[in-house]
Amino acid sequence: MISTFIKKVRAYFKRLFSKGYKVELVDDEPDYVDDKIIYIIGEADFHAIAVMLCPCGCKSKIHLNLLPGNKPTWSITSQEKVPTIKPSVWRKVGCKSHFFVRSGQIVWAKG
Ligand SMILES: [Zn+2]
């Protein structure tokens, strides 16, 4: 019983301090892009573009269109500033990384 509780508490803190992504709403593209922040350019009720650094370490900036109607389009939902992005991000150039962002964590796509 008690050990289960301790495990749960440990898992909670591990998640809390793990290097997950956070979202930040900005009104313009930032000059410096932190590698653990996904910037949403726009306003509270108007999300235009998301900017993040490629998680593979290649330092490329990735821009994701969030405006419906302009293809391709992604959607970002966040809970307590912890983002989930849909669908997956697949770079067609450079490192060709293909990954998901789920609850602030990078999940690499297979293949
Ligand atoms: Zn990359």
Image: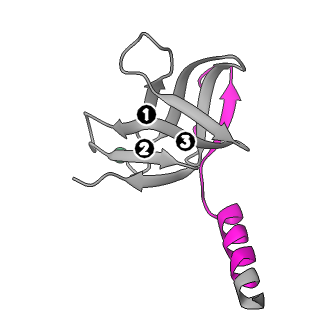
Q: Mark 1 and 2 residues: CB-CB less than 8 Å, in contact? A: yes
Q: Position of residue 27 (x, y in %)?
A: 68, 19
Q: Quadrant of residue 96?
A: top left
In the image, residue 58 sits, relative to residue 6, either above or below, namely above
Residues drawn in magenta: 6-33
Query: For the residue marked with disc 2, what is the amino acid?
Result: Cys
| SS state under label 2 | loop
Q: Position of residue 85 (x, y in %)?
A: 50, 38
Query: For the residue marked with disc 1, what is the amino acid?
Result: Ile
**Which marked residue is nearer to the observer: mark 3 or mark 2?**
3
Pointer 1 residue: 62
67 left or right of 14 in image? left
Q: CA distance from mark 3 to mark 1?
A: 15 Å
| Residue at position x 65%, y 64% in the image | 15
| Residue at position x 71%, y 68% in the image | 12
The earlier-in-sequence mark between 3 and 2 is: 2
Q: Mark 3 and 2 residues: CB-CB less than 8 Å, in contact? A: no
Pointer 3 residue: 84
Report if the beta carbon of the residue with label 2 is closer than 8 angstroms to ligand 1. Answer: yes
Q: Position of residue 49 (x, y in %)?
A: 53, 22
102 left or right of 45 in image? left
Q: Nearer the viewer, residue 87 or 65?
A: 87
Q: How many circles with numbers are drawn on the protein?
A: 3
The earlier-in-sequence mark between 3 and 1 is: 1
Q: Mark 3 and 1 residues: CB-CB less than 8 Å, in contact? A: no
